[in-house]
Image (tube, grey):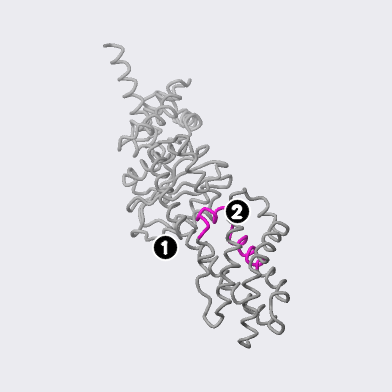
């Protein structure tokens, strides 16, 4: 570029900064629907960014022999919160509008013969502005990600404790929990401590597996909340390889995040008790570990067994409770139970099928008969305690 002609173009560009800023603001309002929909305060910040971009270009164009620098200052005047109001895509649209405005006025601003050089300078500088925009959004995303991780940890801890209130609901919504469908909790351990990269990868995997997901990393213990309208048990199964060796326990499905503390308590109790059942599947449902959970002092498991097994049998007709007790007490022998009850073995077999219908646990299955035996023992203890209380 001829120095004399270049100086003239620089003077024209400097004097035309106000014209460019005004034209850019008009184009923003005419071309960008999202800009028109912004609140007045955010519109003013976007306008300030656009004007700062033009001013920065004018400053740089005054010395085009130096590489573009300081373009990050374009965004310095705007608050960080602006990145939540407009997306990176919107920001790039803003850059394109400003570039187009300068290009449109290049013939008027450039000295004769400098039109091409001015347009090339605008394109070069716009590239730097776009990179700056990406840097601003990446930095904001990094800060936001760290904050979300801390907030997620607090939410998971509160849900595990059962501290559910209105403030917790707002926090859950803030980290993207949609709240549609059911919720379940799965717990296990990690093979090794999770660094930030592995933790971020795990969170991405959980969000691909279900509509909603929360991840809690508590030392070597991993707690995952899954929610949505899909098959949550299948989603949990797909995440199994993300856990380390050892048991992985899935809590019962509940309705909504506010009731998820119940699923979390059952899953955590099951994780504590799973070592007592060496043949337990992986993953194992918390409700399949009811006897073991009773052994570690879980009152919910105790109540479930009494309510769903002992109480229905005690209230049923046809000597079902007596038959089950005789069957279990004689070493699970149909013939021995029949002799004890003075009935035919087929009668015992029929009554045991009725027990399965009433309780959902089959006495003829080795594992499920153990569940029923535990339920009978708990029910009798509860009945004896109530009798002793009445006597006193």
Q: Which residue is mark 2?
A: 44
Image quarter (top left, top right, bottom left or bottom right) of the N terminus: bottom right
The part of the chain drawn in magenta is 77-98
**Nearer to the camera, 359 or 155:** 155
**Nearer to the camera, 164 or 286:** 164
Q: Is residue 228 left or right of residue 325?
A: right
Image quarter (top left, top right, bottom left or bottom right) of the C terminus: top left
How many callouts does the rendering have? 2
Using the image, tell me which numbered label, if any, was put on residue 197: 1
Taking the image as drawn, is residue 29 in sight? yes
Q: Secondary structure at mark 1?
A: helix
Is residue 74 found inside the magenta-colored segment of the image?
Answer: no
Query: In the rendered image of this protein, does residue 268 appear above or below residue 390?
Result: below
**Nearer to the camera, 40 or 391:** 40
Q: Earlier in the sequence, mark 1 or mark 2?
A: 2
Q: Residue 376 appears at what percent x and percent y?
A: 36, 28
Q: Residue 168 appears at what percent x and percent y?
A: 45, 39
Residue at far top of view: 391
Our reading of the magenta stretch's main secondary structure is helix
């Amino acid at each position: 570029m001829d120095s004399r002609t270049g100086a003239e173009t620089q003077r024209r560009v400097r004097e035309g900064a106000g014209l460019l800023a005004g034209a850019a603001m008009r184009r923003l309002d005419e071309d960008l629907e999202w800009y028109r929909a912004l609140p007045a305060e955010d519109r003013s910040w976007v306008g300030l960014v656009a004007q700062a971009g033009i001013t920065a270009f004018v400053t740089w164009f005054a010395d085009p022999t130096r590489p573009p620098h300081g373009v990050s200052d374009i965004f310095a005047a705007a608050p960080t919160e602006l990145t939540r109001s407009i997306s990176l895509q919107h920001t790039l649209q803003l850059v394109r509008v400003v570039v187009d405005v300068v290009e449109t006025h290049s013939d008027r601003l450039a000295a004769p013969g400098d039109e091409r050089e001015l347009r090339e300078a605008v394109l070069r500088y716009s590239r730097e502005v776009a990179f700056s925009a990406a840097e601003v959004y990446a930095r904001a995303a990094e800060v936001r990600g760290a904050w979300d991780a801390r907030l997620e940890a607090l939410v998971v801890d509160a849900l595990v404790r059962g501290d559910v209130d209105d403030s917790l609901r707002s926090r859950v919504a803030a980290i993207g929990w949609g709240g549609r469908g059911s919720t379940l909790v799965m717990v296990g351990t990690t093979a090794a401590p999770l660094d930030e990269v592995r933790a971020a990868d795990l969170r991405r995997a959980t969000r691909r597996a279900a509509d909603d997901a929360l991840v809690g990393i508590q030392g070597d213990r991993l707690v995952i909340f899954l929610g949505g309208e899909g098959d949550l048990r299948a989603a949990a199964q797909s995440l199994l390889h993300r856990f380390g060796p050892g048991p992985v326990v899935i809590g019962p499905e509940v309705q909504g995040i506010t009731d998820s503390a119940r699923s979390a308590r059952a899953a955590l109790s099951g994780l504590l008790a799973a070592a007592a059942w060496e043949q337990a599947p992986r993953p194992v449902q918390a409700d399949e570990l009811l006897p073991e959970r009773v052994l570690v002092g879980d009152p919910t498991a105790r109540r479930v067994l009494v309510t769903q097994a002992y109480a229905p049998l005690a209230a049923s007709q046809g000597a079902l409770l007596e038959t089950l007790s005789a069957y279990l007490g004689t070493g699970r022998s149909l013939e021995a139970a029949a002799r004890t009850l003075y009935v035919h073995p087929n009668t015992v077999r029929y009554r045991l099928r009725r027990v399965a219908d009433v309780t959902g646990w089959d006495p003829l299955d080795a594992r499920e008969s153990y569940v029923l035996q535990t339920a009978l023992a708990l029910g009798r203890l509860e009945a004896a305690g109530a009798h002793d209380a009445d006597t006193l």
